[in-house]
Amino acid sequence: MKQSLKPSFVGLSPASKASSRAARGASRKRDTLCELALRRELWSRGLRYRLCHPGLPGRPDIVFPMPRVVVFCDGDFWHGRHLEARVAKLARGHNPAYWVAKVRRNAQRDAEHTQTLKVMGWVVLRFWEKDIRRDVGRIADQVVSVIAQITLQSGTLPSA
């Protein structure tokens, strides 16, 4: 059985307790602006979903239980959009060892959660914060399309 290696941040620390607290406070875990925008758009199109679905790894932002579709709205910084460029930039900044390890681990954990959900039979959709903010309608079209395809294949109507 493959053992998941958890990163150790021993010896790596944020600049200060105050800066760490400020960063955590500024980084919302749910109800982010991009997530709210996508939820509003999906709701306006008649799609009903769940927000907190017990037992799903990674805490998906939006869950469609019947077609078994989960949606993640990933923040560009924390989830490592353009990971190598992000790491290069972090490596030049303050406390680079901590931040590089942090963002790399977040990206790795996202991939692990995606794989686990797929094995569990879920369709996983991940969208970047900037893409949602740029064109929420296009992102909603993609979600609607995936749900419609699954619904047609299964012959059942989606429900929340």
Image (tube, rainbow, N blue to C red):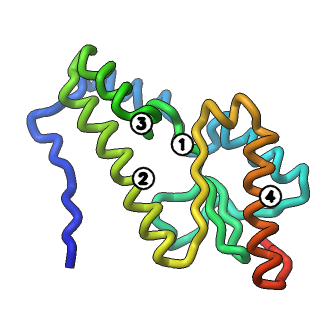
Marker disc for residue 110: 2
Q: Is residue 67 left or right of residue 20?
A: right
In space, the residues marked 2 and 4 are separated at their CA atoms by: 23 Å
Q: What residue type is disc 1 on?
A: Asp
How would you rate the neighbour count of disc 2 (Cα within 10 Å): few for under 14, some for 14-19, many for 20 or more? Answer: some
How would you rate the neighbour count of disc 4 (Cα within 10 Å): few for under 14, some for 14-19, many for 20 or more? Answer: some
In space, the residues marked 3 and 4 are separated at their CA atoms by: 26 Å
Q: Which numbered disc, 2 or 1, marks the residue that appears first in the sequence?
A: 1
Q: What residue type is disc 2 on?
A: Asp
Q: What residue type is disc 4 on?
A: Val
Q: What residue type is disc 3 on?
A: Gly
The residue at which mark 1 appears reads as 74
Asked whether 24 or 121 is in front, the reply is 121
Residue visible at 19% across and 59% down in the picture: 5
Mark 3–mark 2 CB contact (< 8 Å): yes
The residue at which mark 4 appears reads as 144
Q: Secondary structure at mark 1?
A: strand
Quick check: 58 above or below 54?
Answer: above
Query: In the figure, residue 14 lies in which quadrant?
Result: top left
Q: Secondary structure at mark 4?
A: helix
Quick check: 159 above or below 25?
Answer: below
Residue visible at 21% across and 55% down in the picture: 6
Query: In the figure, residue 84 lies in which quadrant?
Result: top left
Residue visible at 77% across and 80% down in the picture: 153
Mark 2–mark 1 CB contact (< 8 Å): yes
In space, the residues marked 3 and 2 are separated at their CA atoms by: 10 Å
In this view, the mark in front (2 or 4)? 4
How would you rate the neighbour count of disc 3 (Cα within 10 Å): few for under 14, some for 14-19, many for 20 or more? Answer: many
How would you rate the neighbour count of disc 1 (Cα within 10 Å): few for under 14, some for 14-19, many for 20 or more? Answer: many
The residue at which mark 3 appears reads as 80
Q: Secondary structure at mark 2?
A: helix
Give percent across and percent down for residue 126: 57, 51
